[in-house]
Image: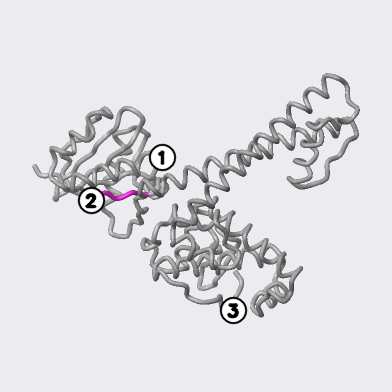
Amino acid sequence: MKVQTIGLDLAKNVFQVHGVSACGKVVFNRPLRRVQVLAFFEGIEPCLVGMETCCSSHHWARELRKLGHDVRLIPAMYVKPYVKRGKSEAVDAEAICEAVSRPTMRFAEVKTREQQGILALHRARDLIVRQRTQIINMLRGILADFGIVIAQGIERARRFADEALGGAVPDLPEVARDVVLNLCHQVAALHARVRWYEARMEMEARKDPRILLLRSIPGIGPITASAIVATAGNAAQFRSGREFAAWLGLTPLNKSSGGKERLGRISKMGDGYLRRLLVTGMTSRVRQVKSHPERSEPWIDALIIRKPFRVATVAMANKTARIIWAMRTRERFTGPPQPETAQ
């Protein structure tokens, strides 16, 4: 019996495949070892294959597409409603097979190897930045026990670490002194690693015209631009700029009922890393506008006056996300942002 749709539940070693025919009859539901997956799909005529998005899903999607299969990646949250009962590989594969055949299902774009390489830079940098923050917080806490306060900001903490390593260590007990010096060494080393990742991102950004184009948007730097290109690709999977902004979690939650429209806070769904980069970039832009009013635009001035600071920066991030979508889908700069009601 010919298989029309397959649900593939990915795992580290043992995968599960659930196949159904055109009439919906189950053809197979069986486990596969990792080394058996490609050979199994080589023996099947090209069909629709669904998988949940995970760390290895893009690799398997590329490999199965080489064999002629139509591969679709589904966010895990959209598969969960089709799980009937219990939790097992067989049940999950069946749910994926059911979800991928739905006409209104939303799918994720399969990333290229180059996109995943850029994302590796971002993930590693994000990890090092968080580790640096943890070490600095530990350093501040230990010094605070001895009445020594480091001013706020990464640069102040890094400066203290450089001075301590240069010999200007505060008067501390010998044990605490050794701990502080060790933490200062870690701060200096992690800061150097962060700079290396940022320099490599800048170097990669210069090679890609798509990233250079996005950097023409005010408030978008090489880190944000490269993260958007690597994550969203050409953004063709989104039907509109609002849908792209909603994917980033920058649109308000809709809790309307009984004909009354109620919009709450932003949903914060989707890619939190991109959302954080966009909001941070717009925060920097607002601060720059306050210190250099001549660089401002009328719609930004009106938004800052009308809305609280954080609401204004999030609204600007929403607006910027829509501009990014237009640029990625049309491959050209669409012009400066126009006034828009803050959300």
Which amino acid does the dot numbered 2 rest on? Answer: Asp
State the separation of the CA atoms marked 2 and 3: 42 Å
Instruction: Report which residue position mark 1 lands on.
Output: 55
Report the residue at 51% width, 58% height from top.
Answer: 225
Q: Which residue is mark 3?
A: 339
On whether residue 245 falls in the magenta region, the answer is no
Mark 1: which secondary structure?
loop
- Disc 3 crowd rating (10 Å Cα; few below 14, some 14-19, many 20+) is few
Q: Residue lying furthest left in this view?
A: 1
Q: Position of residue 276 (x, y in %)?
A: 59, 54
Which residue matches tag 2? Answer: 70
Q: Main secondary structure of the magenta part?
A: strand
Q: Which residues are magenta?
A: 70-74
Which one is earlier in the sequence, the residue at label 1 or at label 2?
1
Q: Secondary structure at mark 2?
A: strand
Spot the residue most to the top.
Answer: 175
**Crowd band around label 1 with a 10 angstrom C-alpha radius: few (<14), some (14–19), many (20+):** few
The mark nearer the N terminus, 3 or 1, is 1
Q: Residue at x 23, y 39 (%)?
A: 18
Residue 163 found in image quarter: top right
Real-space CA distance between mark 1 and mark 2, rounded to the nearest whole angstrom: 19 Å
- Separation of residues labelled 3 and 1 (CA atoms): 39 Å
In the depicted structure, whether residue 332 falls above or below residue 202: below
